[in-house]
Structures are given as C-alpha cells and as structure tokens.
Image (tube, rainbow, N blue to C red):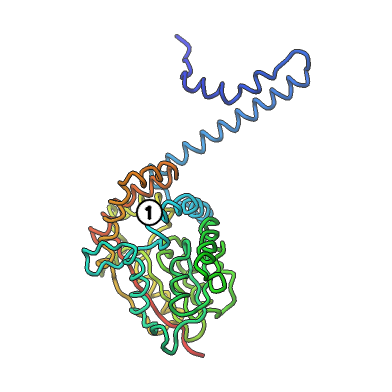
C-alpha cells in the first residue's frame, strides 16, 4: 500500500514556517542542535494549535454555535475595532439606523441624525431651551460617539459614552476634540453589564442599538436602572425578535435558525422581545413605560447599506478589514430577510425612574 503523501502546499507552509530553525542546525554545537530542536517543536505545536483553533471557528460558524459571555466580549471588541473605520469612511460618525420618513429619502446621514431627534421627541424629552432638558447623559454602547456629541450640542449636556472597542473609544475622543466638545464628551472602554458609574448619576440613560449585544438582559436592565437618577429617563432602542403570540412558547425553528446565523456574524447572544424588556422594567418599578415598533421607519436603511457596500471603496475596505467584517456585510442580507418576514423588530422603549 503506498504511503500517503503530504500536500505540496502544506509542505511549503511548514518549510516556510520552520526554515530559520532548520538552517540553524550545525554539528559544531550540540547545544545549538538541542535549542533549535526545541524551537522546531514549539513552532510545530503553535501551528497545530492555530490550525485547530481555525478549524473550530469554521465549524462553530457553520453550525451557528452560540458564544459564551467572554467570547462575545472579545468578539464584539474585535469586530468593531476592525469595522468602525470602514463604517465612518462610508457612512460617517453615526453607527445606527436612519429615520426614513418619507421612505424614499436618500439623505442617509441626515436620516441618522433625524433618528436621534425623533427618538428623543418620541420619548418625551423636552426640546432644547425648555425646562427639564437632560444635563448628564450616558451613552451605553456609544460606537464612535455620534449620538453623544449630537446630544451634547443639542442640550449643552455633559455626556459619557462606553464601548467594548478600544478603537471606538479613542476615535470618539478624537472627534470630540476636533468638534470642540472635549469638555462635554468623554468616551471609555467599559462593560455595560458593570458600568463604572455611581448610582443615580445620569438624568438621561441612552442605549441606541447596543442592547442586542448584551448576553444577560436582566443584568443589563439592572444597570440602566441603577445609574439613572430619580425622575430621570431611560431610552432603549434595540433590535428585538417579534413578541410571541398567545399560546406560543418560543419562536419557530426556522426563525431561530436565521437569528443564530445573524448572531455568529454580529457577535450577538440570544435575542429577546420588546415584551421581555417591558416586563423587566415593570419588575424594577419603572413608570411611564412606553413602547413602539419602528421597523417601518428604518426598513429602507438596510437596502441603502447593501447598495453602498457594492461600491469599489466599500469592497476594498471590506477586503482590508478582514473576514469578520466581510461576514458582517453578508449578514446584512439576513437582517433584511428577518425584517421582511416580521421576525426582527426595531424596538423603541422608554420609561422613567420614580421620583423619591
């Protein structure tokens, strides 16, 4: 029986990896032989571990395996470290959906700014210059700080933003300085499930399209309620799955399978519904709870993003950003499918903490 032959490509890769050690072998020094043999084994072990790790990632991706909390934190930080520059180059400083009313509008950057203003208006936050406007704001999952800086300018408020991405925090601070807002806006790396802020520190807690990344929704809501001041307001805008119908105990297998694919691409944990969030807030004594589904207002956004991703600039940027960003771009089609089938909802939730 002929002996199995190694792939020429594999042999070339191994030779390239270990060439320095092989060339260093010399009969003039037995210690050098020992040292280089050890180096060879070390590199061989690292190569095997790297191949094994890559194989596991491919397998888990194909099977849409759910990630644990630590893997999510690492993955989210890395994903946004790699993709945020590309997003800013194409779409600007606001890393969220736009407000498409009317639905045929094409001024996409202004649509993103309008989404902030319309969300504040919907939540009942007073207009600038009126009594009761926010003065201390936290932006939970701040991206590169577009919302924070807009709110700071709008109300003259001080804002603090947190993100898991070192790149986003650094870029947020750079933009604040460039825009003359360094004294009002501060961005740092922190975990939204363990925020580095005092109890009841903020009169507006703003979480815009970050709740979907939270692996522990109960802890997330606990933290939002902890840092908001009595009489202060929480605005939570997040992707959710549809509310379950009466008699349903879970989503369908088809729906779960689609969400699992999206989760792998965007480093998301299991989803919840707007109903789930409302129940958590009710249990914590929140008052004036208001909810809505704004899926219709953002529906054209994904088509616009997909169209923009086909430009030469976007394609080149994707290639430079790496596999996870490319996978995220592909997942936009899955998001659009979820919106179209009524599975994915753009949930709007606001409430207040009772006055003392």
The x and y percentages for residue 4 are 47, 15
Q: Residue at x 41, y 75 (%)?
A: 235
Residue in the picture at 40% in, 61% down: 95
| Residue wearing tag 1 | 90
| 117, above or below 93, in the image | below
Q: How many marks?
A: 1
Residue at (70% x, 17% y) in the render:
25
Tell me where residue 99 appears, x and y as whole percent: 30, 68
Q: Dot 1 surroundings within 10 Å: few (below 14), some, or many (20 or more)?
A: some
In which quadrant of the rendered image does the N terminus lie?
Answer: top left
Residue 325's place in the image compared with 156, above or below, is: above
Q: Quadrant of residue 113?
A: bottom left
Instruction: List x then y, in percent, for residue 116.
Output: 37, 71
Q: Work out whether 333 lies above or below 92.
A: above
Compared across the picture, whether 309 is left or right of 220 comes to left
Residue 290: % across, % down:
34, 79
Residue, far top: 1
Q: Is residue 63 left or right of residue 138?
A: left
Q: Nearer the viewer, residue 300 or 149?
A: 149
Image quadrant of residue 246? bottom left
SS for dot 1 = helix
């Amino acid at each position: 029986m002929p002996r199995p032959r190694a792939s020429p490509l594999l042999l070339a890769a191994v030779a390239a990896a270990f060439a320095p050690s092989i060339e260093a072998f010399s009969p003039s020094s037995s210690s050098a032989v020992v040292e280089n043999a050890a180096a060879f084994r070390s590199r061989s072990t690292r190569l095997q571990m790297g191949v094994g790790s890559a194989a596991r990632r491919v397998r888990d991706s194909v099977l849409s395996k759910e990630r644990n909390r630590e893997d999510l934190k690492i993955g989210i930080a890395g994903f946004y470290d790699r993709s945020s520059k590309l997003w800013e180059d194409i779409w600007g400083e606001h890393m969220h959906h736009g407000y498409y009313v009317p639905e045929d509008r094409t001024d996409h950057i202004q649509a993103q700014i309008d989404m902030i203003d319309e969300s504040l208006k919907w939540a009942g936050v007073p207009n600038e210059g009126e009594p009761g406007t926010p003065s201390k704001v936290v932006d939970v999952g701040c991206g590169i700080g577009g919302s924070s800086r807009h709110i700071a300018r709008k109300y003259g408020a001080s804002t603090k933003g947190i993100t898991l991405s070192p790149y986003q925090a650094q870029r947020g601070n750079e933009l604040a300085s460039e825009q003359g807002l360094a004294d009002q806006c501060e961005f740092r790396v922190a975990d939204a499930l363990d925020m580095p802020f005092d109890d009841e520190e903020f009169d507006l807690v703003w979480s815009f399209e970050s709740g979907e990344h939270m692996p522990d929704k109960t802890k997330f809501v606990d933290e939002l309620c902890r840092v908001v001041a009595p009489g202060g307001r929480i605005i939570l805008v997040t992707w959710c799955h549809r509310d379950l119908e009466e008699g349903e105990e879970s989503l369908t297998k088809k729906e779960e399978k689609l969400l699992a694919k999206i989760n792998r691409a965007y480093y998301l944990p299991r989803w919840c519904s707007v109903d789930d969030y409302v129940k958590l807030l009710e249990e914590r004594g929140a008052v004036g709870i208001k909810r809505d589904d704004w899926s219709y207002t953002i529906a054209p956004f994904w088509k616009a993003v997909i169209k923009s991703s086909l430009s030469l600039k976007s394609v080149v940027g994707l290639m430079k950003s790496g596999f996870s960003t490319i996978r995220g771009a592909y997942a936009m089609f899955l998001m659009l499918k979820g919106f179209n089938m009524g599975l994915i909802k753009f949930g709007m939730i606001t409430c207040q903490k009772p006055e003392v």
